[in-house]
Image: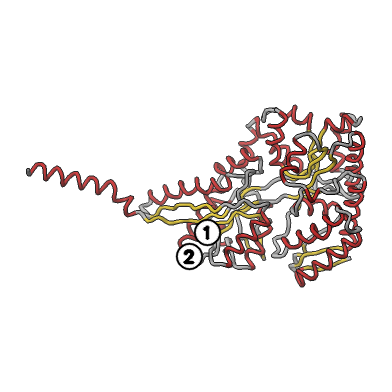
Amino acid sequence: MRLTNVFSTVLLFMIFVIITPNVMAETIKISLWSRHDNSGPMRTTNIIEASKQLNKKLKDSGDKRQVVVKVIAKHVRGYDIDAERVLERHKKGHTPDIIVAGHEWLGKFKKEGLIVDLESHILTNPDYYYDIIPILWDAVMVEGKRYGIPQDWEVRMFFLNNEMMRAAGISDTFIESLPRKVDSGEFTMYDLCDLAARIKKKDPEKIGILHRPNFGPEFQMAMASFGNTFYNQELDKLVVSRSKLLTYYKWLHSCVKSEAIPAKMTRYSWRKFNAAFIAGSAFAKFHGIWNLDDQLEYLGIDREDKDSYNKRVTWINAPAGIKGGRSTNLSHPIVYTVGNTGNKETTKLAKELIALASQPGLNNNHAISSTHLPINHGQWSTIETMDSGWGLLEAKRLLKDTNLIFMPNHSSIGEYNRITFENGVMEIELNNKTPKDAMEEVIDELQKQLNDDVMVVD
């Protein structure tokens, strides 16, 4: 009996030793707000992977805490709507610990008290952030401080269907010269619409140029081609120019009139928008580099087969509005930012998670799998060794001779984009207003809604 009692005691002690660390571990929940986005699922899963690394660090240091990431993912049409949703949640007192967002919303998030300043965190953790491409820090700056960590960035372009051009009698020599002609200012936005109209005239069943059906970054890229600027940093005001906005709207009107752009483009569903180009029913699609994989899959081209793809599709920046002008590209970095929950413990852990998720290993997995540009200089050396990395390298080269812009991180930029689209682009394309009337209405509405946040110039 004594031996049995001794054995039982030892066994109980062993069980206690084995299970005690788990029993005593303190679980810390970190909420992650991330739009459900098929074009970049690792924006979410990289935070979860980072939590595994963090938990190991905590355990190895003797810290009894363990982090569990709770994902709040919403199906919404774009980052603008997603940003509005998370602001509503914050106002109700349910602020997430980590937020995945379009960089241009950082100004609004700061103004509403949704996020915390990350400047001190970045400066005191140089090992995490020393290799981030410097220009990306511009995209997370609000009033001189950084409020986000770049998660990725990308290149936007016009994808052009080469086979449609050939069918319309356009030579391979001209097709191959297009990117150079665009960046030298020889081929303009008007030339692009003329080319689309020519192709549609050859085959009336085809669509000319596709653009997104709701407001978003590409429209600022097109507006910039006509000399529009959007921000006065010294005054911290958004800018709208009567003459340059009118010039942009006149171009848009002429494209619709020639049927280069469908009159009901703004009524398209996202499904129709995305399917039309890869199905070969549209000549041009104005969107981003992440479309590459879907195009390769539909065309039946291996990801490593650069030559076969380039034979079928050409990429160009947004051409200048006038001969001799400069082409434009707009990059729209997605960022990690930390919610202002008032909880010092979860805030510190959230900062550690976004730092770990931003390291080359996890960020490379996202960049390569989703065809988004990586954030660290050193990641490019890995991509250069991969046969499947040519798409990212070609996209990066597209930026070389162009005017690269980011949207301003102003608190009213979302409303600015909505008004210039809904009161301008939509009204012109649906033939409800002339370019001049649309311009006047847009400026009137901007002044009503944005008040002192916008300045009107000639």
Residue 205 versus residue 359 in the image, above or below: above
Q: Which residue is drawn at 33% across and 50% down?
A: 22
Q: What residue type is labelled 2?
A: Asn
248 horizontally vs 294: left or right: right
Q: Which residue is drawn at 62% across and 68% down?
A: 112
Q: Which residue is drawn at 64% across and 43% down?
A: 39
Q: Quadrant of residue 145?
A: bottom right
Quick one: 348 or 446, which is closer to the camera? 446
For disc 2, the neighbor class at 10 Å (few under 14, some 14 to 19, many from 20) is few
Q: Which of marks 1 and 2 is nearer the N terminus?
A: 1
For disc 1, the neighbor class at 10 Å (few under 14, some 14 to 19, many from 20) is many
Q: Which amino acid does label 1 sit on?
A: Asp
Residue 356 versus residue 114 in the image, above or below: above
Rounded to the nearest angstrom, the CA distance separating label 1 from label 2 is: 9 Å
SS for dot 2:
loop
Q: Tell me residue 29's x, y (percent).
A: 45, 56
Q: Quadrant of residue 138?
A: bottom right
Mark 1 and mark 2 residues within 8 Å of each other at the beta carbon = yes
Reading the image, the residue beneath label 2 is 343
Quick one: 83 or 204, which is closer to the camera? 204
Reading the image, the residue beneath label 1 is 97
Coloring scheme used: secondary structure
Quick one: 369 or 127, which is closer to the camera? 369
Q: Tell me residue 141's x, y (percent).
A: 66, 60
SS for dot 1:
loop
Q: Tell me residue 267's x, y (percent).
A: 78, 50
336 horizontally vs 353: left or right: right
User: Quadrant where the C terminus lies?
Assistant: bottom right
